[in-house]
Image: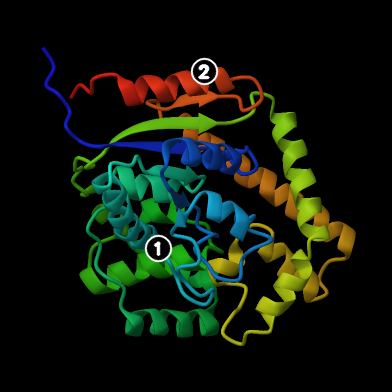
Amino acid sequence: MPMRDTRPPAIALMGPTASGKTALAVDWCQRLGTEVISVDSALVYRGLDIGAAKPDAATRALAPHHLVDVRDPHEVFSAADFAREALPPMQALAGRGRVPLLVGGTGLYFSALLDGLSELPEADPGVRAAIAAEATERGWPALHAEMAAVDPAAGKRIKPGDSQRITRALEVWRLSGRPISDWQQAGAPRRFPFRVLRLVLAPSDRAVLHERIERRFDQMLAGGFLDEVRRLRADPRLHPDLPSMRAVGYRQAWAHLEGRTDASTFREQAIAATRQLAKRQLTWLRARHEALWFDPASDRARLEQALDAFLTRPPAD
């Protein structure tokens, strides 16, 4: 006979961008009297509002959100930061008898929180500054080659233009003398302190998702997205290699405002990049074999049944 699982419940509502997660989350928050833990790498940044589809004040009044607007856009917010900062509000909600609702599409954040990350060496500003100076002098492809020489696995996984991950891999190597791939493989799994219902919201027809992405981006443009990026570009601390400015849409808008693309090309590139993001998100989600999949247009009744069954059935270990 299985032992009773005494961990408090939590819900993970996952899915690609523009799949309708926020609308469903607001409904469930009101019905369950709970709050959202945002699992989105763009929403953590202040000032990234229109292009990140950040829930507005009215939405957040109906469904309070945590992990939104917690960093300035010149700062770095890692998956480890997310895991560390997401757990306290989850525990606070559980302490009040509420069911935390994790909502978003950033797979690395979900993995860091639910599955744990290896105990990598902490960031060192001095080492990072040295790597940045070398990149200015030698270029990121040269640093990528240096990283690949000591860590072939990372060399295959990390692209030559991914300055953030190249920096981290070289930093870990220089601080510890061990490749970052070794550290990541050595991470010991630990049991997450919540039992989690993992739900994926995704249109079964890819064309529907593509149409939603295009329509939403046009709404962003009409809502002043380029003016938002102009304001961000006026901040001397920001540059296009920062994680915040590499977010989908923002990177393309920055290039457009630099005069490197016309308005039509900018729109096409931003929509294409968003579709590629959705494809990567779906690929990651398909590897989550424990997750239940639902089409937002046709599976609402099944979604509600899955939620009710999870919240009412006796938990088994």
**Rendered position, 126 above or below 144:** below
Q: Which residue is mark 1?
A: 78
User: In this view of the protein, can residue 145 be seen by the observer?
Assistant: no
| Foreground residue among 117 and 92 | 92
Relative horizontal placement of residue 100, taking residue 192 as reference (left or right): right
Circle number at residue 302: 2
Q: Residue at x 41, y 84 (%)?
A: 129
**Rendered position, 31 above or below 135:** above
User: Mark 2 or mark 1, which is nearer to you?
Assistant: 2
Secondary structure state at the residue bearing disc 2:
helix
What's the amino acid at mark 2?
Arg
x and y, in percent, of residue 234 in the image: 68, 84
Secondary structure state at the residue bearing disc 1:
loop
**Rendered position, 143 above or below 269:** below
Q: Residue at x 25, y 53 (%)?
A: 118
What's the amino acid at mark 1?
Ser
User: In this view of the protein, can residue 109 be seen by the observer?
Assistant: yes
Position of the C terminus, as image quadrant, is top left
x and y, in percent, of residue 191 in the image: 19, 40
Q: Residue at x 53, y 67 (%)?
A: 45
